[in-house]
Image: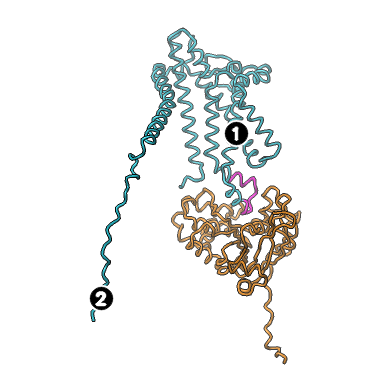
Chain colours: A cyan, B orange
């Protein structure tokens, strides 16, 4: 007896799907039209948004390179008629003023953000601090300069430190608000995981919350630093004016790149214009280097670098 | 006819109690979420809390390591005792309680750190850092995860699969040598294979630990637990708010084969309503 081999049923004809409606080109005319308009608008917006940035960079680099040279970094700032390119004092001034402001504002701001996000939460004190930080964000920078002028400069005179104080006041609310946002993004699951192991809250915050939020905290602080580094108004009457190097943070008047840009641009002389462009290029470069360095450090410290 | 004394089955001695509650209730604000729970959790066994959603199983579980303290507005009444210690005594430090009574959560929640650092975290917190490598390895072995990760201890824990992450969380919990492990629906986010591995792991762990597990999966409770408590919700007398009540607490096979309360029977036979 032979084993009957099971026969396949006769192959049914393959269903032929009508796929024409799956093809994008078959969209109805109005939808196709809308799609094109929307795409065009989106592209136009991107170009419109990027154009100023590109123009600024191109112009600043093109014009600023004329001023670049050893003298730019080492020379004193010459008189406004001079064609010399020295800008060193303003570079040093910018570095020390911004650094001092960062050292004051970032730790304080991050600690305040930790308080708001981890301890104060929805309490009255936290709500008040949050409100005041909001108000502080809205204070015009020149008013911040006036404030420091009245409480510091009138008592102790102009100095890089006075300028740093004014910048720190500007940075503080930015650091607090962005920091709180970043800390709140850390999932409660992680907080609970840590606490359930018998960790004290302070240690939990140090070892879980802050490391998890570190990239965000850095971004927020960098925004504040970049903003402060480019400020002119609050420094006008807090750090004074000087044309020679003054690396002393606490004594003597000082100068920074934005002020030199302002002075140079207002001057009728060609050499001053060149110096202003050079100062602008140096300022952008400094902010860029800060940003890059901070990203690098964050990546190093980041808890999840193994991913 | 009298039964010869020799035929009397000696009463099985109740195992020693690890945790006990007496008239335990939990308020969220002025809402009593679970009410009047009295039970004894035996040592070195697996005790399951089953019941429908919202019956307060997780709330009850969190009373045992005082995680409810962290929820704004939560308040515990009644007594919870660990051995002969009242866990809600004023002198008790909840942070220390949580070291002895560990917890595994519903969603795997490894830290965004390496596998090694996840397990070492609690050990570092509690300064148990002598032979740190050995302790980490031991915890990972006991959590049946060592073979999966031994070559990748420095890799991010977030790269592990969900089931592996949950076993990592178990390893992290047992690394600090707790006495009791609370598990809050540890398998609800896992597939059946991963669930099976966690259940096998629980059987291994019950030799060393007392395990309390919350689950709404009755098969899991039947398969994996020695004792089971059935909780249900009751509509509040004067409102539409529901509160959790303990209906029945017994050895698991008793509870599933001879439920004493019709509500238990309805629930385990799928006629809950």
**Quadrant location of the N terminus of chain A in the rendered image:** bottom left
Tell me the chain of label 1: A
Report whether A196 appears left or right of A216.
right
Tell me the chain of label 2: A
Q: Are marks 1 and 2 in contact (CB under 8 Å)?
A: no
Q: Residue furthest left?
A: A2
Look at 75% across and 56% down and name the residue there.
B89
Look at 66% across and 53% down and name the residue there.
B67
Residue linked to disc 2: A4
Q: Position of residue A78 (x, y in %)?
A: 48, 11
Q: Position of residue B93 (x, y in %)?
A: 71, 53
Question: Does B167 appear above or below A252?
Answer: below
In terms of image quadrants, where is residue A233? Answer: top right
Q: Secondary structure at mark 1?
A: helix
User: Visible in this render: residue B44?
Assistant: no
Report whether B31 appears left or right of A79.
right
Out of A113 and A51, give the one closest to the viewer: A51
Residue linked to disc 1: A177
Q: Residues within 10 Å of mark 2 (few under 14, many from 20)?
A: few
Sequence-first tag of 1 and 2: 2
The magenta region covers A195-207
Out of A52 and B98, give the one closest to the viewer: A52
Out of A30 and B268, give the one closest to the viewer: A30
Out of A147 and B162, give the one closest to the viewer: B162
User: Is-magenta flag for residue A197?
Assistant: yes
Q: Determine the CA span between mark 1 and mark 2.
A: 80 Å
Does the magenta stretch mainly form a helix, a strand or a loop?
A: helix
Q: Position of residue A104 (x, y in %)?
A: 61, 29
Report whether A93 appears left or right of B246.
left
């Amino acid at each position: 007896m032979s084993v009957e081999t099971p026969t396949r049923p006769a192959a049914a004809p393959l269903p032929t799907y009508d796929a024409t409606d799956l093809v994008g080109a078959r969209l109805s005319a109005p939808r196709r039209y809308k799609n094109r308009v929307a795409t065009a608008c989106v592209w136009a917006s991107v170009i419109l948004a990027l154009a100023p940035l590109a123009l600024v960079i191109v112009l600043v680099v093109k014009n600023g390179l004329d001023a670049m040279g050893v003298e730019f970094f080492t020379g004193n700032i010459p008189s406004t008629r001079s064609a010399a390119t020295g800008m060193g004092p303003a570079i040093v001034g910018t570095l020390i003023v911004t650094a001092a402001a960062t050292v004051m504002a970032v730790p304080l701001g991050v600690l305040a953000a930790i308080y708001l996000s981890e301890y104060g939460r929805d309490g009255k004190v936290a709500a008040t601090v949050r409100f005041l930080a909001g108000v502080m964000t809205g204070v015009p920078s020149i008013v911040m300069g006036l404030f420091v002028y009245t409480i510091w400069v009138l008592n102790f005179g102009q100095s890089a430190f006075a300028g740093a104080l004014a910048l720190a006041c500007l940075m503080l609310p930015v650091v607090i608000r962005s920091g709180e946002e970043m800390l709140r993004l850390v999932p409660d699951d992680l907080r609970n995981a840590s606490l359930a192991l018998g960790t004290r809250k302070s240690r939990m915050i140090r070892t879980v919350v802050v490391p998890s939020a570190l990239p965000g905290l850095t971004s927020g602080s960098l925004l504040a630093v970049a903003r402060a580094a480019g400020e002119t108004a609050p420094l006008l009457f807090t750090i004074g004016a000087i044309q020679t190097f003054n690396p002393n943070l606490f004594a003597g008047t000082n100068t920074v790149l934005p002020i030199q840009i302002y002075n140079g641009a207002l001057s009728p002389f060609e050499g001053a214009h060149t110096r202003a462009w050079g100062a602008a290029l140096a300022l952008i470069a400094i902010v860029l280097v800060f940003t890059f360095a901070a990203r690098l450090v964050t990546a190093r410290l980041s808890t999840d670098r193994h991913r | 006819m009298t039964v010869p004394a020799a035929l009397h089955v000696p009463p099985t001695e109740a195992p020693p109690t690890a945790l006990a509650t007496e008239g335990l209730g939990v308020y969220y604000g002025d809402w009593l979420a679970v009410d009047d729970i009295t039970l004894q959790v035996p040592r070195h066994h697996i005790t399951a809390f089953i019941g429908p959603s919202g019956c307060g199983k997780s709330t009850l579980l969190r009373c045992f390591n005082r995680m409810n303290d962290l929820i704004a507005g939560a308040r515990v009444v009644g007594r919870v005792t660990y051995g002969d210690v009242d866990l809600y005594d004023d002198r008790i430090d909840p942070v220390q309680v949580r070291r002895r009574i560990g917890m595994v959560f519903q969603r795997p929640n490894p830290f965004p750190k390496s596998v090694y650092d996840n397990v070492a975290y609690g050990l570092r917190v509690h300064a148990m850092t002598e032979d740190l490598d050995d302790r980490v390895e031991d915890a990972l072995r006991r959590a049946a995860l060592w073979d999966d990760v031994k070559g990748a201890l420095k890799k991010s824990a977030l790269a592990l699969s969900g089931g592996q992450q949950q076993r990592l969380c178990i390893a992290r919990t047992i690394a600090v040598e707790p006495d009791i492990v609370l598990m809050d629906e540890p398998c609800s986010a896992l597939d059946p294979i991963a669930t099976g591995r966690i259940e096998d792991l629980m059987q291994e762990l019950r030799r060393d630990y007392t395990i309390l597990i919350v689950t709404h999966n009755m098969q899991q409770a039947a398969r994996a637990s020695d004792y089971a408590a059935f909780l249900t919700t009751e509509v509040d007398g004067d409102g539409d708010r529901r509160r959790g009540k303990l209906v029945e607490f017994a050895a698991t096979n008793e509870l599933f084969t001879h439920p004493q309360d019709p509500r238990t029977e309805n629930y385990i036979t799928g006629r809950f309503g």
